[in-house]
Amino acid sequence: MTGRNPDQPGIFKAISRALLRLAYGAAAALSGGCTGIQSAFSAFGIEAESTRALTWGMTAAATVITIGVLWLAWHAARAPAGRLDHQGGMRVILWLGAIGPTVLLTALLVSSLTKMRTLPTGADDLKIAVDGEQFWWRARYLPAGGQPVETANEIRVPVGHTVTFALTSPDVIHSFWIPGLAGKVDMIPGRTNDLVVRATRTGVYRGACAEFCGLSHARMAFDVVAMAPADFDRWLAGAARPAAGIDSPGRHLFEEYGCGGCHTIRGHAEDSTIGPDLTHVGSRLSLGAGTLPMTRDALSRFIRDPASVKPGALMPSFKDMPGKDADAISSYLAELR
Ligand SMILES: [Cu+2]
């Protein structure tokens, strides 16, 4: 090369302008779209917090390296010919091509390996067995020494305590994902995968199925409530109790329409485990696995035509059910708190 190529600085200017635009775009997307109840950036658990720290660390390092390389390239393009002799070139390759990446990648490997360790568990820790079903979640709380408690479509955890999720599925592969708490774990028929978590702050968050599992895969979400330990214990004790003695027309209609053939309401309608447990359904934050708000109207709509809310839902439609029957059943279900 006899001199500097007059075109090159123009190219670098264009590239740096494009990179700057990309950075603006990414910053806008991050600040707007990436926070909220279902976001790995709104971490409320130890696992998600360390993943977030790793993400920011790697982003910062990648930014520094990119800027450094662009700076070098810019200088190289503008340097007069013959400025760098062979030995100088070899030194650049040695430091920036071998030693630098080795140190950096080793540091990254060590820091990510330490973050990959699962939290230690104890015999007294709470276990929650969660089954991914088409298209809802069966949850059984298994407190050490206590009786199992079955619920559905909502996960509650005590803050500051280690909880082990035992994840499986009776039908197809689903994936259990609470972005703010921990990474996603597949729920595979015939095998149980454990996920150990610890929540660090209270709040209401959201999880979702992260593996396409059929028509209503996108309507397979759940509320996640991280509670102070005392509140959690009180909630679990309440969830363990059978339904209160209610004598309303809806209770009889529930029987007449054969809803008990698929749903358990402990104390009222026993031993049918095809659909979600409805013992305290009225206290859930949402209906149909995070699909509708928990209101009487939404209950009526869901009961008469689940497929209109969740295409492919494995609950039959009761389209011929008179509106007043649906409303009576909804009032009854809403009372199950
Ligand atoms: Cu699923």
Image (spheres, grey):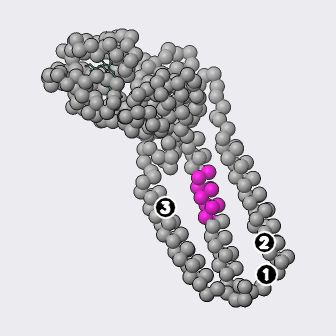
Relative to 133, residue 198 above or below = below
Where on the picture, by quarter, is residue 303? Answer: top left
Part of the protein shown in magenta? 54-64
Q: In the depicted view, which residue is nearer to us: 109 or 125?
A: 109
* Residue behind mark 2: 92
Q: Residue at x 66, y 70 (%)?
A: 69
Comparing labels 3 and 2, the label whose residue is closer to the camera: 2
At label 3, the amino acid type is Ala
For the residue labelled by badge 2, is the local secondary structure a helix, a strand or a loop?
helix
Q: CA distance from mark 1 to mark 2?
A: 10 Å
Circles 1 and 2: CB atoms closer than 8 Å: yes
> Which image quadrant for residue 79?
bottom right
Kindly identify the amino acid type of the residue bearing the numbered disc 2: Val
User: Count of labels shown?
Assistant: 3
Q: Secondary structure at mark 1?
A: loop
Pointer 1 residue: 84
Of pointers 1 and 2, the one earlier in the residue sequence: 1
